[in-house]
Image (spheres, coloured by chain):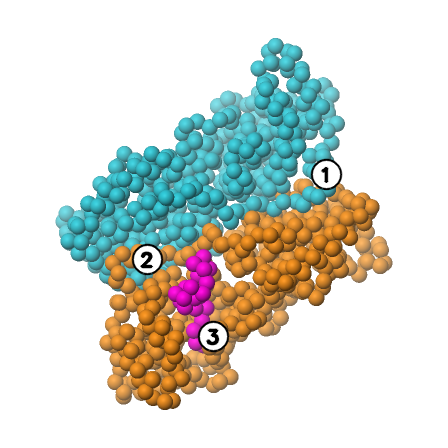
Chain colours: A orange, B cyan
């Protein structure tokens, strides 16, 4: 697979000098035009053999293009903060905004290849990492990102020659890091596992380009031309609708009888039971959150539900049990300007708690498959692919020890009407009821269908939905608290088993 | 994910009786029409909980539709023959032809879920199997197959009730196998790993349908309607062009200097060296093929090359070394009628040797990215996706111990001209040269490009290409034999390491 990049490609200085001015101008034009359109973020992944000119090429790109719109990111050792979050978090927070270019030096690929080379894991785990990368890139591209993947290559012989050359040159010898010498020993493995990774992750929407790295003129001109071609093609192409989607299975439901119908909406608690149970569960939660086993976990609670189902009240009862330093409530409304310049899930990734912390989402990433679907705020392709993107997202959270608890607070239509009318009558509750609420109410059947699909497709063993019968607020609040406690205690118990 | 299929879906007998006649008629119509069009094969995968009515539903489908066009396949224990071939071979050989329906009872999914439930492997290996299934189904759908995936579901309580019911009924108690009772013990694991599998493999082009299995009217009608919907949609939809392709990385090649240019075409052997080396290598091959370590392997040799490059002569020198019972030569010409009714790779899968055997392909599956690409016999999407389909195919071979050796016999244009002219002059060689050969010769640059892409994208660590400098036939023949020997001996050496 690398054979063609070991045959000694060379470009003469005269050719190079003749071509560069036009190339630079065209690159600048494309860069500005993409920045103007602001619809797409450009991600350049730099990988390959040490000594093959990666650093020099990136330096050159910054000279050729406008560096104000380029962010070069290196990913070396993880910081403390990064270690306290799921693995993917460090990449999400470094994503360039739409209209900008991020050059990722060291990235998910370098991490997985190094891990395999050093025997930290076997092929099966490497393949898992490969699939994770594939899903990440598919999502980014479906969101409009433009991904370039460059593998700078040298044959083993070329690599040794080049390292020797650099070493003997006092002006450049500082460039050789201990890592370089180490790689000259692991070259064979590095190339073998690199090939496996490239073979499986070169997709039509995000292909790998292998660049022979020996000759600086050749490699610079080649990378420049490939970037230009890709950027120009993106400027011409309309946004492509996502295809080949993972959807999550759907329970066949030809009987019109759905999961929501199967709830017993008469469940309730009388006042004294409520008060007793509430206090018990709050104390239990307070203990769980302060438990030292919590240091291996974080807690994420998602609150979704019908309008007037009592999300706010339930959240307050949860918060009441806790020290404000331990939790954070994130109300989800319209996205900010920064958030609109990023893939959909970015705004949620940035709110993911560090280990031992608790984040409560008042509405959440499920907006895409609820309100955005029903109101037509996004295309069918967009909300369809969201199910599996969300499953992936939650899987990444749970794999890092985050406990994800998701509540749907369900009330029936009569109860909603009563509460709407009550709100309109009580002055200090009037702010809670708007025209939107009445409008949404008319779409009850559409929301019902959306909720059914959502639960079918995203209630997973790792992050199940809990449906809360919320006609009775007391019942609902206690069930929410109890579910949180059970989820945390189950996670603690699983730790013990390991 | 299964919650909606545990709520007690029921359809009344009257509704069922009223609906079935029209459903049957529509199913028959759709079946005949798809058979007429003959463009698509229908694959129905049956999985799920024991006792959920899988067998009864399949029986019913055979009654509702025309059973002459339905093949029900069960995959229990592997046969001796299946064990001697790569794992996927058993599924390939059972594929229904285009225009027919294959119902796969037990299939790649049951195999992977059972394996995981019984602890034969961990999640990472399960994920590898999941990805294998995904790639297989993507390929089948890109080839026009229509895949239905049904998961028949029961809650744990429902399952136990149903098993008890069957047991107490003398007419049905025979239906309960030891496997059923076993599954009632492994229910939780089975559902947990089943969910992981369904979540990751439900794609827009091959979605999973979860069917609540308790009520026979409900499950039968639901499956019938889903099949009908899917078949009718397929009849309406034009064949969709494949998207989201894995391509394999491409070495950037802006210098017009390719791998083929880097060959030393002057390499040659004089007659006496040739005779000595030929005999040595033939003896070595004969020994290797009869070596008892060969019992863990099979050998596949692919011969591709320029016209008149000497493929036939080289193959004869290989065969001359061997007992005809040990090898099989497969010349690849136009596909047969049976072969045209199957996915592209089917005709090669059927020729894959059992363990300890050797198959020589005189031209091969690479036809798709060579002649079919250059001559426009298939669409760009079809040959583009072939690279990764071929890589997957060869990976499945090598994982099963098959040693895959691929030769490109390269000659230069002058040598080809000489040989063409010589062939026209010698009467007994005249059959070897046709108008086609002269026509192909005019497309030299297009073939050159196709060969370059092919080597870049399919020369893998597990199945590398060997480029043979074939201007000198002696050199070429000896290099072919030596490469085969080295590949076998390397495989034997790897066995020892394990």
Residue closest to the far top: B427
Helix, strand or loop under label 2: strand
The image shows residue B12 at horizontal and vertical percentages of 17, 56
Q: Is residue A349 above or below residue A206?
A: below
- Residue A152 place in picture, x, y as percent: 69, 51
Q: Check disc 1 and report the residue beneath it.
A: B257
* Residue, disc 3: A333
Helix, strand or loop at label 1? It is loop
Question: What stretch of residues is rendered in magenta?
Answer: A359-384
Which is closer to the viewer, label 2 or label 3? 3
State which mark lies toward you, 3 or 1: 3
Q: Determine if marks 1 and 2 fall on one subunit.
A: no
Q: Is residue B291 above or below residue B54?
A: above
* 3D distance between C-alphas at marks 2 and 3: 31 Å
Contact between labelled residues 1 and 3, with CB atoms less than 8 Å apart? no
In front here: B187 or A68?
A68
Mark 1 surroundings: few (<14), some (14-19) or many (≥20) residues within 10 A = some
Q: Is any part of residue A406 visible from this angle? A: yes
The alpha-carbon separation of the residues under discs 3 and 1 comes to 56 Å
- The local crowd at label 3, few if under 14, some if 14 to 19, many if 20 or more residues have their Cα within 10 Å, is few
Residue at which label 2 appears: A251
């Amino acid at each position: 697979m690398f054979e063609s990049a070991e045959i000694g490609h060379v470009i003469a200085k005269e050719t190079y000098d003749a071509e560069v001015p036009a190339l630079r101008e065209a690159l600048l034009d494309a860069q500005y035009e993409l920045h103007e359109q602001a619809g797409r973020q450009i991600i350049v992944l730099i990988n390959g053999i040490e000594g093959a000119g990666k650093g020099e090429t990136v330096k050159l790109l910054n000279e050729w293009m406008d560096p104000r719109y380029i962010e070069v990111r290196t990913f070396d050792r993880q910081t403390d903060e990064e270690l306290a979050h799921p693995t993917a978090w460090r990449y999400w927070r470094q994503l360039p905004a739409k209209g900008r270019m991020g050059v990722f030096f060291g990235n998910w690929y370098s991490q997985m290849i190094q891990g395999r080379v050093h025997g930290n894991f076997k092929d099966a785990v490497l393949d898992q990492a490969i699939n994770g990368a594939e899903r990440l890139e598919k999502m980014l591209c479906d969101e409009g990102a433009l991904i370039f993947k460059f593998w700078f290559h040298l044959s083993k012989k070329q690599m040794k020659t080049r390292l020797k050359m650099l070493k003997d040159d006092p002006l450049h010898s500082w460039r050789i890091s201990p890592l370089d010498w180490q790689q000259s020993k692991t070259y064979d493995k590095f190339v073998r596992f690199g090939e496996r990774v490239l073979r499986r992750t070169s997709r039509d929407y995000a292909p790998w380009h292998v660049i022979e790295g020996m000759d600086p003129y050749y490699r610079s001109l080649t990378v420049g031309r490939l970037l230009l071609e890709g950027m120009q093609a993106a400027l011409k192409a309309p946004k492509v609708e996502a295809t080949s989607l993972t959807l999550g299975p759907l329970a066949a439901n030809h009987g019109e009888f759905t999961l929501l119908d199967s709830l017993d909406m008469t469940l309730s608690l009388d006042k004294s039971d409520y008060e007793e149970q509430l206090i018990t569960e709050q104390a239990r939660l307070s203990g769980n959150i302060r438990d030292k086993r919590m240091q291996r976990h974080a807690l994420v609670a998602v609150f979704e539900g019908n309008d007037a189902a009592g999300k706010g009240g339930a959240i307050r009862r949860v918060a009441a049990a806790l020290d404000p330093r331990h939790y954070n409530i994130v109300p989800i409304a319209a996205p900010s300007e920064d958030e609109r310049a990023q893939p959909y899930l970015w705004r949620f990734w940035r709110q993911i708690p560090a280990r031992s912390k608790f984040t409560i989402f008042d509405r959440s990433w499920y907006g895409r498959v609820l309100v955005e679907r029903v109101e037509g705020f996004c295309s069918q392709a967009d909300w369809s692919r969201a199910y599996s993107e969300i499953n992936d997202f939650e899987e990444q959270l749970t794999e890092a020890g985050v406990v994800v608890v998701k509540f749907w607070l369900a009330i029936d239509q009569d109860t909603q009407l009563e509460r709407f009318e009550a709100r309109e009558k009580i002055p200090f509750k009037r702010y809670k009821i708007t025209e939107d609420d009445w409008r949404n109410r008319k779409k009850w059947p559409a929301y019902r269908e959306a909720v059914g699909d959502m639960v079918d497709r995203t209630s997973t063993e790792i992050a199940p939905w809990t449906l809360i019968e919320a006609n009775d607020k007391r019942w609902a609040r206690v069930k929410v608290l109890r579910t949180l406690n059970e989820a945390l205690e189950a996670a603690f118990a699983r730790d013990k088993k390991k």
